[in-house]
Image (spheres, coloured by chain):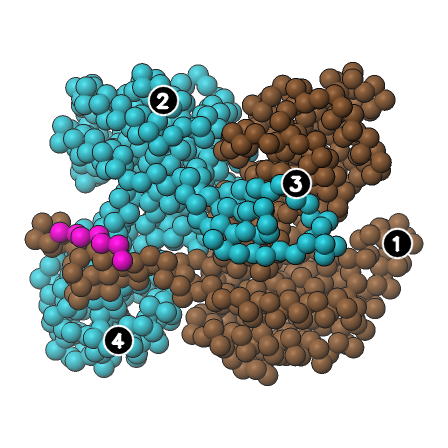
Chain colours: A brown, B cyan
Amino acid sequence: MSTLDINQIARRAKDAYLELLGCSEADKNEALRAIARRLSEREAEVIGANRLDLEAAQQAIHAGEMTVAASKRLICDSKKLKNVIDGIGQVIALPDPTGRLLESTVLDEGLVLDRISCALGVVGVIFESRPEVVVQVSSLLLKAGNAGILKGGKEARHTNAVLMETIRDALEKAGSVPRDALQLLSDRRQIQELLACDDSVDLLIPRGSKELIKFIQANTKIPVLGHAEGICHVFIHRAADPEKALRVVIDSKTEYPAVCNAVETILIDQAAPDSLMANLIRALQQSNVSILGCPRIVEKFNHLEKASEEDWSTEYLDLKVSLKIVDDLKQAVRHINDYGSHHTDAIVTEDRQAAEQFCRYVDSAGVFVNASTRFSDGYRYGLGAEIGISTNKVHARGPVGLDGVVTYKYQLRGEGHIVADYNSNRRRFKWLKR
Amino acid sequence: MSTLDINQIARRAKDAYLELLGCSEADKNEALRAIARRLSEREAEVIGANRLDLEAAQQAIHAGEMTVAASKRLICDSKKLKNVIDGIGQVIALPDPTGRLLESTVLDEGLVLDRISCALGVVGVIFESRPEVVVQVSSLLLKAGNAGILKGGKEARHTNAVLMETIRDALEKAGSVPRDALQLLSDRRQIQELLACDDSVDLLIPRGSKELIKFIQANTKIPVLGHAEGICHVFIHRAADPEKALRVVIDSKTEYPAVCNAVETILIDQAAPDSLMANLIRALQQSNVSILGCPRIVEKFNHLEKASEEDWSTEYLDLKVSLKIVDDLKQAVRHINDYGSHHTDAIVTEDRQAAEQFCRYVDSAGVFVNASTRFSDGYRYGLGAEIGISTNKVHARGPVGLDGVVTYKYQLRGEGHIVADYNSNRRRFKWLKR
């Protein structure tokens, strides 16, 4: 595929999408089953290719160009592949998100307007490290009738290539959907070219580092679904249950610190008991979390290191947290709206009214009460699968499942109806909802 | 307001939006009623300001810088103002689009996830000519709890300024919503600055010429809702009822040729009877529509002028149409998907299966059967009001009402739930839909 230029690739994707409009749910599920089968059959090849990527990663670690943690994300062994194949089964089990009647209005006798969900079009997905994303994203896009142009990181290039080859091979053999519904870009320079394809690509989903996402947002006219960072907060309100407060904070910070839904700043109400503050600090320190405190908390607990102004907008992605005393709920909300990334923020309180205020005024995709920020995830939300997480206000917000890769169209059926009849008052609209 | 820089304006809009989060439906409707009242009271001032704009327009006409048609769009007389005030009443009557429970899932015992509609944030609306847009857009944005930054055309600047002054005056007196919820930019240079406010502006809605919209799309990171042009088609299928075909074509082309939902290209099935082709051409010519034909139709009707390749992607916005013979439904669909602007396209046919195929394969926001393309409009669709028309695939598509200026947030309520319990299989998700 590397000999094709981006315009050919985009044109093929567009044609495949238009052809997919004619595919039934059964056609799409048949193709997904074929992919699952073929991946099983070619397990040895996938693992072989993955070995090449892992060897290169070892060299990169020795050269100080990659962390051990990053290299672990590249692994695609037998167990991982089994999970990935199981994931395809889950996508097959999801209801078809297209062809649903969302709304129906009788505009007038014999004139009916239906709003119907349909595939979005051509979706570009740019991601880093984890090669299993090739399969996950491909199956979600296909289920919704979209064509996908994928670009993975070069650190997993051998694995990515074999996975995509296997997928396309399966599509060709199954014959129920066009093979060019899914294509993989092989060259980093093609990203820049892809960003210019605003005539043929309908949506871009970047998944990876803040730098990658900001670069993409700044360099394309194509709509971008994503989140640059997750500066999540837990606010411990004066009416918090102390035990719940510690549970939620420790889980939000330590359950998996390297991800976007981990907490980065803890806000504590000045009216919370000193004992709760002391227990919170102790619990964090016992979990090896280093704490950077605001002046007020450092005055009370003078062994704490001081936070700088920058800390309030820093995503540590590590066992590190900033801690601030706030006057009240209102100040907590203001801090979150000013410094947060509108991803996920939680309050711990037994006061129902305070909880409602928090949920109303915090301007984030996820507002949680007495629950860990780590729940902010497509799988945990029950979306079946996740194509990305969005901190946008438009289109889709928060963890995004199949709903994020469909749109709708209006279908109007008449009997020769014309607007002149309504503008001249010969006829009148009825607008009856069905 | 002209002394404020754009960052101050954007900051005030953001603060107003955050304050609006606390406003009830009653607060918002009270503010809307106050606006309607105040506009009535200040009718003389509005008309006086409008006179200045109309005088300037007269001079522009004499200087050959404005058409008479364009100057008519500037009129804001007593009758127009009454319509505008009635429009506010219609917006008041619409249900509040925010605070609606869209979806609810019990993730586990005591852990409930709700998806709730909410205001979008700060919306920038850039428009040309018609000053009544100030009031229409302001009332829609306010109803949905958004803050708006508006920029009208300089040709209506006196009228726009008095209208916005009146609106803000009414908000201040009513006191139920912040006055800075609505602001008007007064200087053309501020558009460029507004486009750079991607930190505080959540959505841009340009309404006006193709050039304006393309300029905005190309120069901002803020999501843009709009449509650059409307290249709409009517396809007369071989199984068309001849009378319906003529009605639909004539209405689509002549009812109001200067708007985006007027038809620009007519496709006719080669298997349609010659008599239908002849009658179609005669009917168009009797309506003073000039026709540019494809080689095949010009061969049959050699008095017709020939269309160039460019004609198939030209939006005439005039009593002019291109006409092409196609082999069949499939070729019609391909022509529409290749040359159209994905706005609104219609088929005339009595063949239900052909109609279904057309609706499925035509990749447009509106796909119509036996109805005029002119129905593609928020008012006619029964959306109550229209904030714009979108040919985007993301967020909102087609005529966009209040739904286009809201988003949603996820609210998760637990009892100290943590993710570690699920990752260790101590607890399992239930995902029960409510």
Q: Nearer the viewer, residue A344 or A189?
A: A344
The mark found on residue B416 in the picture is 3
Q: In the rendering, at what x and y percent does residue B378 appear?
A: 28, 48
Q: What is the three-letter code of the residue carrying label 1?
A: Ile
Q: What is the three-letter code of the residue carrying label 2?
A: Ser
- Magenta residues, as a range? A428-434
Q: Residue at x 45, y 30 (%)?
A: B21
Q: Share a chain, discs 3 and 2?
A: yes
Q: Nearer the viewer, mark 3 or mark 2?
A: 3
Q: Residues within 10 Å of mark 3 (few under 14, many from 20)?
A: many
Secondary structure of the residue carrying tag 3 is: strand
Q: Residue at x 28, y 42 (%)?
A: B385
Q: Nearer the viewer, mark 1 or mark 2?
A: 2
Q: Which residue position is annotated with label 2? A: B176
Q: Residues within 10 Å of mark 1 (few under 14, many from 20)?
A: some
Secondary structure of the residue carrying tag 1 is: helix
Task: Report in which chain the residue with disc 4 lies.
Answer: B
Q: Nearer the viewer, mark 2 or mark 4?
A: 2
Secondary structure of the residue carrying tag 4 is: helix
Q: In the rendering, at what x and y percent does residue A16 appear?
A: 50, 71
Q: Which residue position is annotated with label 1? A: A61
Q: Nearer the viewer, residue A87 or A353?
A: A353
Q: In the rendering, at what x and y percent does residue A434 appear?
A: 27, 58
Q: Residues within 10 Å of mark 4 (few under 14, many from 20)?
A: few
Q: Share a chain, discs 3 and 4?
A: yes
Chain-order first, disc 3 or disc 2 = 2
Q: Which residue position is annotated with label 4? A: B352
